[in-house]
Image (cartoon, grey):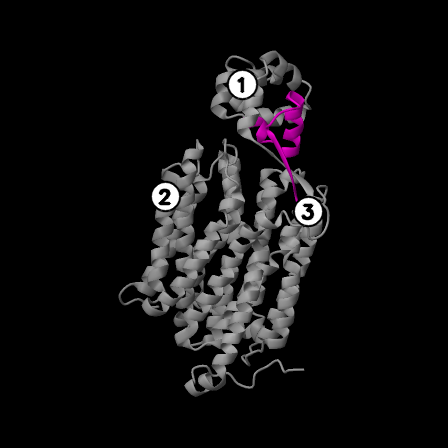
Amino acid sequence: MAKTWLDKWTPEDDNFWEAEGKKIAWRTLWITTITLTLSFATWFMMSAIVVKLPGIGFKFTSDQLFWLAAMPGLAAGTLRIIHTFLLPIYGTRHIITIATLIKLIPVIGIGLAVMDPTTPFWVLMVLAFTSGFGGGDFSSFMPSTNMFFPKRLKGTALGIQAGIGNFGVSVVQFVTPAILGVAIYGAAEVFTSIDVKEAAATFTGIDAEKKKEIFSTLDTAVQSKIILNVDKKIKDSVKSVVPITDKAAFFAALPAKAQGKAVSKIAPKAAEKVMNKFDTATKAVKNKNIYLQSAAFWYAPLLIIMGIVCWIYLRSIPVKASFKEQLDIFGNKHTWFCTITYLMTFGGFSGLAAAFPLLIKTLYGNFPNAPDPLVYAFYGPLIGSASRVLFGFIADKVGGAILTTITGVGLIVGSAMLVGMGLVSPTSMDQFPMFLAVMLGLFFFTGVGNAGTFRQYPIIFAENQRQAAGVLGWTGGVAAYGPFFFSMLIGNAIAATGNAKSFFIGLIVFSVIGTVINWHYYQSKGCERPS
């Protein structure tokens, strides 16, 4: 069996690099980049799957769906912190191979779980946590790549790996809609959705007395949910004429458009039963067969193949340190400053990517001709990943600090536009194109910042490359909590106010802090560590 540890590794020695180092480094980069792409894809697969769960019969609240989208981020952040210290102990070959194969647990587990709509919420929460395996190993991939390349190529190599790896987020959101029609294993599920326009048309053709009579036969809990979904302005207007305590009379007095919208907001399977009670021939109910389990199962053969490839072709660099020795990074203030700036850049990218589909569904999903979240959601990560690859090369030319500052300014302006123009508290679908454009702009800037920050860190810690690798792992770990923080905070904001304004105001404040720190310590004239 081929040995795991290389005899020596001196990439700054031009003779060694040209003779043997270059071939090994680039081979390692391409293998680990492919596996990192699969890591990101499996990490974010739950964010694409959750938007389809209500339609196949899962009775989860909006808050629970945001929790399922958030849980992989919580897991990834925690696991990245652990991965930060593993590489110098076990080496690239063992870590990357095991990290690739262990992701079979979530892809098979989630695939089996979504085949049964009675699967308990806690089971899906555990499986969502395991999908964080794909986000956690980033803090072994990047420090490994950092050690394989000479200083002049670090920005390029890290930009290629992280940028292409980030395409995994777009892969999951792009492939999921297509793969739902492919039978890999198991029977199809019936996916139900309600067309708000057709629902309104259905109610328009029924007289008020008939509506009152039918509504009174509904389960009281269903009645309450429907009334709760009525727009506040309309609710206040109608209840001044009809007491809201008489739910059937109150519902019958609502405009047909409001009735259709209120019914469409409850669980799709429940809404289907309600619409069929009012009119068995309604065109509002849309049913189609999908294989939601395929959105998870299709990764399994790829993971097995890449796990074998990793074990055969990867080797480990002989840079070893105990866990205790590696803790010295926490005594350096720049570790904490870099943590803040990377939470702003990669935390912003991963957080927005995880929350984007549900954000579209929650803010714009109840308007007539509402957008399918998965049709648009993949564009954000795609743009962020592409800008990270492109600006990885630029960072090697102009430095990373200026790119990080530009990112901070972009996030501040973009978030201010979302709040100031009412794009995260919409009143009609007319606002969706601008919302989408600004969100894609935010993704673009996070990609620029990701390239900038990872160019900066090896330079900021140039006196100790082992520490530089540790900081890359640690900052990546904290930033991986982005999906958890973003999903939870956005979900809480929407639950409390019906919109996401307060979240983006908070993002503005945090981006100002990160930008000022970066400019003061790493970019301004005479700064401590220009990078």
Percent position of residue 290, x then y: 65, 44
Residue behind mark 1? 254
Inspect the magenta stretch and tell me whether residue 88 lies in it.
Answer: no
Say which quarter of the image contains residue 106: bottom right
Image position, residue 268 (x, y; %): 63, 34
Q: Looking at the image, is mark 2 or mark 3 earlier in the sequence?
A: 3
The reply to whether residue 528 is visible in this rendering is no
- Tag 3 near tag 1, CB within 8 Å: no
Between residue 453 and residue 57, name the one nearer to us: 57
Is 525 displayed left or right of 425 in the figure? left
Inter-mark Cα distance, 2 to 3: 38 Å
> What span is in magenta?
261-290
Above or below: residue 488 compared with residue 18: above
| Circle 2: residue type | Ala
* Picture quadrant where residue 222 is located: top right
Query: Foreground: 436 or 502?
Result: 436
Q: Are marks 2 and 3 in contact (CB under 8 Å)?
A: no
Picture quadrant of residue 392: bottom left
Which mark is drawn over residue 280? Answer: none
Q: Residues within 10 Å of mark 3 (few under 14, many from 20)?
A: many
Between the C-alphas of marks 3 and 1, the distance is: 37 Å
The residue labelled by disc 3 is 114
Task: Specify the label residue 416 is tagged with.
Answer: 2
Q: Amino acid at mark 3?
A: Val
- Callout 1: SS: loop
In magenta segment, residue 270 = yes
User: Mark 3 or mark 1: which comes first in sequence?
Assistant: 3
Q: Residues within 10 Å of mark 1 (few under 14, many from 20)?
A: many
Q: Does the residue at mark 1 contact the one at mark 2 (Cβ under 8 Å)?
A: no
Q: Earlier in the sequence, mark 1 or mark 2?
A: 1
